[in-house]
Amino acid sequence: MRVLAAMSGGVDSAVAAARAVDAGHDVTGVHLALSRNPQSYRSGARGCCTLEDARDARRAADVIGIPFYVWDLSERFHEDVVEDFVAEYAAGRTPNPCLRCNEKIKFAAVLDKALALGFDAVCTGHYARVVDGRLLRAADPAKDQSYVLGVLTAEQVAHAMFPLGETPKTEVRREAGRRGLAVAAKPDSHDICFIADGDTAGFLAARIPAAPGPVVDTDGVQVGEHAGAFAFTVGQRRGLRIGHPAADGRPRYVLDVSPVTNTVTVGTAEQLDVTRLVGRRPVWSGPPPAVPTDCRAQVRAHGEAVPATAWCDGDRLVVELGVALRGVSPGQAVVLYDGVSDDRVIGSATLESATA
Amino acid sequence: MIRTPDGDPPVRTVYLDHAATTPMVPEAVEAMAALLGSVGNPSSLHASGRAARRHVEESRETIAAALGARPSEVLFTGGGTESDNLAVKGLYWHRRSEDPARRRILASAVEHHAVMDAVLWLAEHEGAAVEWLPVDTTGRVHPDALEAALAADPAATSLVTVMWANNEVGTVQPVADLAAVAAAYGVPFHSDAVQAVGQLPVDFAASGLGAMTVTGHKIGGPLGVGVLVLDRAQDLVPVLHGGGQERDVRSGTLDTPAIVGMATAAELAVKRRVEHAESLATLRDDLVHRVLEVVPDAVIGGDPDLSPAHRLPGNAHFSFPGCEGDALLLLLDAQGIECSTGSACSAGVPQPSHVLIAMGVPEGLARGSLRFSFGHTSTAADVDAVVAAIGPVVERARRAGQTSGPRA
């Protein structure tokens, strides 16, 4: 196969590309330039979009012995990921930009271009497996990234290659060392690559007009004032600036953020529990389930999957959770796994509501 | 490694990127290699130093003769970028030191980054006022445009810099005419002649230039060595400070083997120029005509008049509507065909070429550009390979569309 390996400059994508070569594929490396100003994105250890990362990716491609190019996806990334991120927060939702990047950039813009240029697949260093065209969790549960890939359609998965899915991370680092890849000891990336200093609240504050508004309890009684509703996420406890303690003396959490009324609602930990999730425009790995189907539902990249029952209601996905989850916000994605093995992704959707 | 679909041995490399760098001619390799094991700093007074000095001075005389300059006007540098920086910054600082009012720099809008970025740096850090001389749709600066710019405020103008021939689209500038305009106002004129030597007649004295940039690796010499030809009467302020080896204008121990290699190449490049230029033009004309047959909507960048007075004989430049240059490059590279998008690559991220934009080419079309540049190892088989590949490559790249830049 002709394989296009997306190389971030990190250890995972470098080893993935090398393994694709070992498997006999004709591999070409690309680094995706995602920043309109490469200097502004976070450097080295904490991101994937800097000049240093581009150089690391190029050196890895040299060592592996494959052609290497840089593709400029910065405009697309800005529109589809950064602006979406800001708009979602402005609307009171909590987006996952990594998931959006996989959905709109790596396995859409890049995959489309790759297929048009005659490639058969896009290879990345994600920890996940594809078996018989279905997306599965990685063998290493601590590194499993199937959640951030759960938004991919069957067609996208069919053209995806994840050579690291069977391997623990520690083994990938050792292998990188054996292969002479200088990135073997490079720290993992964390957090959001386009927020240089890791200050998400500051990033949003510079982009979303903030107005002071009320913090209310579930009875609608004002208990404080906030400087801007977008800065709060469901489940947040710190920084509420509530003037006086609750009657029961227990800590309070953000239950809801409503940008329309510029109101933040707070309540007890128990009131954060949700059991019913509704998502928009679900994506299914196979035929959509015609009847309520037992499965497991996961709402965070590194969260636990809980027993659930899911069904379609028009173009909406409804998920009844067998175990309450705490602090789930609209904008998060729910990814559904096969109910028996909890291994195979069966579908996903972005949440529009999460209720008790 | 390039393989055919059947896993056959690597296919032949078709190298058509001679404007980026061209292979050393064997005579230069031999002359340079003979000296790599020798000791001797040309500045030393002992016998080894004198031997090295003799090689350097003979090379200086050879290069001076080849370029129509006096030996004392040939200053060795580390290459084209250094020569351009030395000329632009050195002339600006010198002229400003004579008269603080001289802060204008007139530069063509199609300069190589080595000139353009040096000028921009002076504007940002040294108070220079830059005026970009406009070009026509072929990329040419008209003497009238320079005349108008100079006449606006001659006393405040520190220098003019216009390249001899453009590296991307091959457009030849009317250098002597432009230099005459500058001379009439008493303003020093610099020209980057990196692409011109060996393809066009380049005579420093006859051209009326004050300073001229030449580099070794574009004319069959080694990388890492170049020349700034600087009029005897022209002073400038150094960029590098140290031993003052080169007329107190450029410091640094001279690289004797590289200088000898460059001199050998320069002499041959000038001696063989007429024949060489003819053979390049034959190959280039053939490529242009046959690519246009295969891809009729391809657009020729630069001057459509392919004669050597208008265009470098080794340069072919196309824009392919609806394609992305880097996709074309990838697909050709996979078949062993090596060329360039011709655009500046900052951090490996392709930007639409400032040269094409200055010529009025729309940004979308500019993004789909390829430069093929011929040199002394080029053959008719190279042209055949491109003609055979280009149709399917353009078709495929067109399907991939344009993903960089704003969404259409």
Image (tube, rainbow, N blue to C red):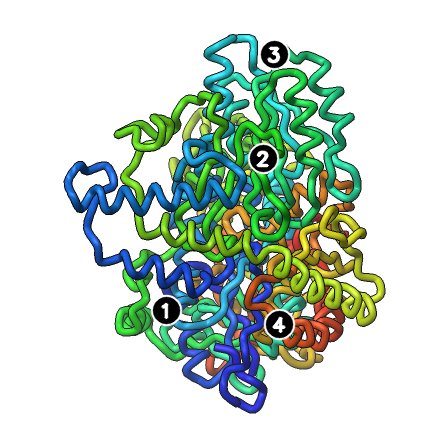
Q: Which residue is mark 2?
A: B191
Return the x and y of residue A260 as percentages of the image width and height. 69, 36
The image quadrant of residue A9 is bottom left
> Residues at badges 2 and 3 in contact (C-beta under 8 Å)?
no
Q: Nearer the viewer, residue A63 or A312?
A: A63
Return the x and y of residue B80 as percentages of the image width and height. 48, 42
**Label 1, label 4: how far apart the Cα atoms are:** 32 Å
Q: Are marks 2 and 3 on the same chain?
A: yes
The secondary element bearing badge 4 is classed as loop
Instruction: Characterize the local packing of mark 3: few (<14), some (14-19) or many (20 or more) Cα atoms within 10 angstroms.
Output: some
Residue at (39%, 25%) from the top-left corner? B238
The image quadrant of residue A116 is bottom right
Tell me how many marks there are. Answer: 4
Identify the amino acid type marked 4: Thr
**Label 4, label 2: how far apart the Cα atoms are:** 31 Å
> Residues at badges 4 and 2 in contact (C-beta under 8 Å)?
no
Q: Are marks 4 and 2 on the same chain?
A: yes
Asked whether residue B384 is in view, the answer is yes
Residue at (74%, 39%) from the top-left corner? B140
Disc 3 chain ID: B
Q: Report the disc number at residue A63.
A: 1
Chain-order first, disc 4 or disc 2: 2
> Residues at badges 1 and 3 in contact (C-beta under 8 Å)?
no
> Residues at badges 4 and 3 in contact (C-beta under 8 Å)?
no
Observer-side mark, 1 or 4, equals: 4
Q: Report the disc number at residue B156.
A: 3
Q: Nearer the viewer, residue B76 or A241?
A: B76
Residue at (73%, 31%) from the top-left corner? B134
The secondary element bearing badge 1 is classed as helix
Instruction: Characterize the local packing of mark 1: few (<14), some (14-19) or many (20 or more) Cα atoms within 10 angstroms.
Output: some
